[in-house]
Amino acid sequence: MMEHATQPDVTFVIAAYNSADTIVPAIESALAQNSVTLDVIVVDDRSSDATREIVSSLSERDARVRLIALEQNLGPGGARNAGIDAASGRWIAVLDSDDVIYPDRTANMIARAEQAGADITVDNLDVVYTDGRSTETMFTREFLEKRGRLTLEDFIASNILFRSTFNFGYMKPMFRRDFLNAQELRFRQDLRIGEDYLLLASALAVGGLCAIEPSPGYVYNIREGSISRVLELRHVDAMIAADQDFLAKYTLLPAAMDAQKQRNRSLIEARHFLMLVDSIKRRSLSGVLKIAVRDPVALRHLKMPIEVRLKKLRDAFFTSAIPTRAKRQTS
């Protein structure tokens, strides 16, 4: 892979918003990749802290690091799109500003993709809890090896709400840049939650082959309690609308369509649950009864303490399931 002297093997795109405390380890982990040529584009999304200054200083010391300073906040999707548009690598790798990757990750993923003739590749993740809990690997190697490839139906089915704690939505894909450009694929800038899910779903829907590297290469840091989050009805409505646009644009095979119907139902159920919680907080008996009549299934979530269920629901959305993390504070 080292023969590509002019064109890097991979461009890392890091969208950053108020990431001064975490951006250096993220960049350094990208620069430390073995057996590949690379560059790193950090897109600062109008941070109010020292993120820009820190990245600028790093870029002066290492020409592989480039800062794009946005003049207005575009959110995670818009910031990443700016990085993709400026990228020159054969592959595009998205790295969150508060995560890191292992040194052999990129070489392993590219090798896996090229062996399969794939345009997309994903890998396993190690989950690190900064509150002292033990690190855990998200999926067993055997589970991912058995799959080998990530299909659209499996990806959608894994992103149905109220199911497992972890799902394929946590995976951070690498894309062939030529594939993204040929298919005119980018993150939805109007989505502040779920833009990751929609891009990978769209890439799979147009026929992109996605190879799975079963070894963990991405370190996913969870900083519980670091920033308060509020999951609002508008977030759910935006995802429902985005899924409707997705269905209007792409023709899904029966298995994927079945999974999509279940996902649609879970989003509607989440919407009704939030409405139910709001009615309870306002002590509106009529509101509670209205939801109960419209969607009795939503009542089953009251078997669990409301705050616990709300936390699980927030965790399901803020990745498209991203737990409490600084980057979701883009506004």
Image: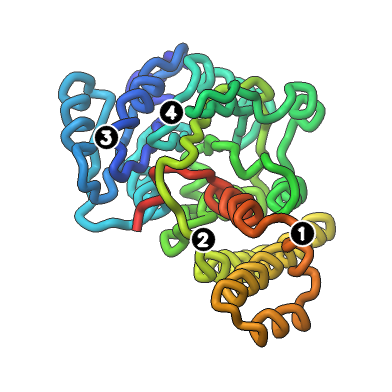
> CB atoms at circles 2 and 1 under 8 Å apart?
no
Residue 315's disc number: none
Instruction: Identify which amino acid the numbered label 3 is placed on.
Output: Ala
Percent x, y of residue 112:
64, 23
Viewer-nearest of labels 3 and 4?
Answer: 3
Residue 20's disc number: 3
Question: Residue visible at 53% across and 38% down?
Answer: 175
Question: Residue visible at 63% across and 24% down?
Answer: 136
Tag 1 residue: 303
| SS at badge 2 | loop
Instruction: Identify which amino acid the numbered label 2 is placed on.
Output: Leu
Tag 4 residue: 10
Task: Count the numbered circles shown.
Answer: 4
Question: Residue visible at 42% across and 53% down?
Answer: 77
Say left or right for 97 vs 315.
left
Question: If you read the primary sequence from the N terminus, does the residue marked by circle 2 or circle 4 appear first?
Answer: 4
Cα–Cα gap, marks 3 and 1: 41 Å
Question: If you read the primary sequence from the N terminus, does the residue marked by circle 3 or circle 2 appear first?
Answer: 3
Question: Residue visible at 34% across and 20% down?
Answer: 28
